[in-house]
Amino acid sequence: MKFPRLVLVILVSTFWLGCGGSDEPGVAPAIQSLSFDPNTVEAGKQSTISGTLQFEDPDADAAAFALKLTVPGGQSQEIPPSNAQGVSGQTAGTLMFAFIVNAILEGEYDFEIWMIDSAGNSSNRLSGKLSAQ
């Protein structure tokens, strides 16, 4: 069985609010309010998905974010963490992201996104669904 090749590229931009972190070490970031567009893409073509999520990080050491994509049929690919520029030193803000999907198969594509701090602590994961037609 031949598996589809997945192509993902992650682009990150960050807007932040808040000021320096607390003295509480080892606290994982928390994320919420995922939004992205489009949620329907054309099968057989490369598409850019862009979105935002809100983050809080009490110890202000958020450093990266990661993404996992699951294609129709269940095969998944996890992208290594990408540097989330501009979030270090911030206790809260909005992370803007974009990734490129080459949706070879028609069907539902699920993805998870999360943040990672400089100590390696992972945030909760937020999920989204893409439909390729």
Image (cartoon, helix red, strand yellow):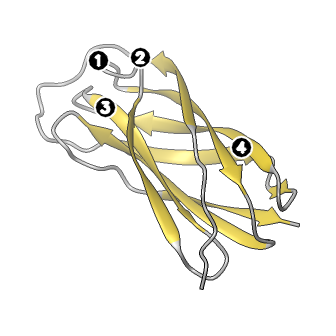
Q: CA distance from mark 3 to mark 1?
A: 8 Å
Whether pointer 3 and pointer 1 mark residues with C-beta atoms closer than 8 Å, the reply is no
Amino acid type, label 1: Gly
Amino acid type, label 3: Ala
Position of residue 92 relative to residue 102, above or below, is above
Dot 4 falls on a residue whose secondary structure is: strand
Q: Provide the residue designation for mark 2.
A: 86
Give the mark toward the camera: 2 or 1: 2
Q: CA distance from mark 4 to mark 2?
A: 21 Å
Q: Quadrant of the N terminus?
A: bottom right
Quadrant housing residue 61: top left
Q: Provide the residue designation for mark 1.
A: 89
Q: Provide the residue designation for mark 3.
A: 62
Amino acid type, label 4: Ile
Task: Sort mark 1 into few (<14), some (14-19) or many (20+) by Cα contacts within 10 Å.
Answer: some
Dot 3 falls on a residue whose secondary structure is: strand
Q: CA distance from mark 4 to mark 1?
A: 27 Å
Q: x%, y% of residue 103?
A: 74, 60
Whether pointer 4 and pointer 2 mark residues with C-beta atoms closer than 8 Å, the reply is no
Numbered mark located on residue 49 in the image: 4
Whether pointer 4 and pointer 3 mark residues with C-beta atoms closer than 8 Å, the reply is no
Mark found first going from the N terminus, 4 or 1? 4
